[in-house]
Amino acid sequence: MSKQYETVIGLEVHVELATKTKIFCGCSTEFGGAPNTHTCPVCTGMPGSLPVLNKKVVEYAIAVGLATNCQITQYCKFDRKNYFYPDNPQNYQISQLYLPICRNGGVEIETAAGKKTIGIHEIHMEEDAGKLIHDEWEDCSLVDYNRSGVPLIEIVSEPDMRSAEEVIAYLDKLRLIIQYLGASDCKLQEGSMRADVNLSVREVGASQFGTRTEMKNLNSFKAIARAIEGERARQIELLEEGKEVIQETRRWDDNKEYSYAMRSKEDAQDYRYFPEPDLVPIVISDEWLEEIRAKQPELRTEKLERYKKEYDIPDYDAQIITESKKMADIFEATTAICGKPKKVSNWLMVETMRLLKENEMEAEDISFSPANLAKLIELTEAGTINSTVAKEVFEEVFKNDIDPDKYVEEKGLKTVNDEGELRSVIEQVIKDNPQSVEDYHNGKKKAIGFLVGQTMKAMKGKANPGMVNQILQEMLQ
């Protein structure tokens, strides 16, 4: 009888906060930029330079804590974590160990197996390190301190996850909460959200956890899922062979789908943590806490509830639209203007999604205004333009946010509803296509479709299809 194993997973998620400036100095946090241009004596660790805390970092951390049901530590402080690495210019990192800003929270996830709460042990604030660039050609390492001092929150979960599916659901939930709060864009590919996976396996029914390993270098949901499957299999194989799993940090190589050991895991005392002497403790007053609580936006779960009550759109549409705060904002603003939620939803679900995919864009990159989408819907609903023309106009709205009214006028795209003009064109089409007319009279009703097509072609697609159909039927009788 082969043994049954259970995977136990906890995550450490680092999120770069969306502040304009760094956590302890006034340098820009913008992604990109020539190496070492967003730097100053503070974030490059020059002797004698002193940190000054960015208040916005604390507000974002509290907002995320409230949204993930944490207790907020109203008297908290920073600690110094000592380690020597070239991308860490002061030779220490300012973090929080003893009194992290948020504790004991949790978020609810939903997977095929149902709903489940994943506990959050703590959330703490810290500064990011610089970035090492290894130059193979010159056989040296270069360091870029642009990222050094960028504010992070680290969200440490409880070891409550049991599968890759639960891990992805948890990360997705965190990502949406944080994006809705505006605290970070959470782009895994740019490193503004990074997850380290702590994983161990144990026999089903065992009360003790197995020995865990930590995996780093995971920059997409797919890589995380693959790494979990790979590491689970590796540990089970070791146990089956009677070998021990070693507690260590491993690096996942997504191309080779293999993880390899980086270093054996030190215990916390190696970091010689002590309270940060250059920063005063943070006191979060009840008033400040209430002020932040009052500003909390509506999160996705609440939005979905409200959409059911307020807008008559299918659940599936609501799920997709609220996947991105940007998309939800456009949906609500456009509906407020034109009052047609189902039509707005259709344009977002079909044409917008198609163009995003074709242009390899994210919903966050949408640049058209709700006002122009509303105008396009009004034009289509009024029959001023037909659906074929509407799609063509929408491509322009999507690309350049043009004004549909002006565009339709300038390009002469209005639907022709002039009966006299239509009749003369249709007469000509009937004359030019005797075979189709004969087919129609011989009971081939489909032939009328061809004649409608020919009329639309002659009218450059600008005729009212309903009217064309009606006049044709009348003339053919």
Image (cartoon, rainbow, N blue to C red):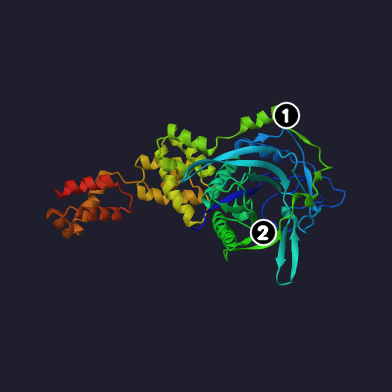
Measure the alpha-carbon separation of dots 1 and 2. Answer: 45 Å
Q: Nearer the viewer, residue 5 or 352?
A: 5
Drawn side of residue 34 relative to residue 465, left or right: right
> Can residue 423 be seen in the rendering of this structure?
yes
Please determine whether, in this image, residue 458 is positioned above or below residue 151.
below
Q: Residue at x 80, y 55 (%)?
A: 89
Drawn side of residue 436 relative to residue 35, left or right: left
Name the front one of labels 1 and 2: 2
Q: Residue furthest front?
A: 1
Q: Residue furthest left?
A: 442
Instruction: Count neighbours of disc 2 (C-alpha within 10 A) and say few if under 14, some if 14 to 19, many if 20 or more.
Output: few
Task: Choose the circle earlier in sequence order: 1 or 2.
Answer: 2
Residue that mark 2 sits on: 246
Q: Secondary structure at mark 1?
A: loop
Drawn side of residue 215 relative to residue 79, left or right: left
Instruction: Count neighbours of disc 1 (C-alpha within 10 A) and say few if under 14, some if 14 to 19, many if 20 or more.
Output: few
Q: Position of residue 352 (x, y in %)?
A: 46, 49
Q: Position of residue 32 (x, y in %)?
A: 67, 56
Q: Residue at x 49, y 52 (%)?
A: 356
Residue that mark 1 sits on: 285
Q: Nearer the viewer, residue 289 or 114?
A: 114
Q: Residue furthest bottom?
A: 137
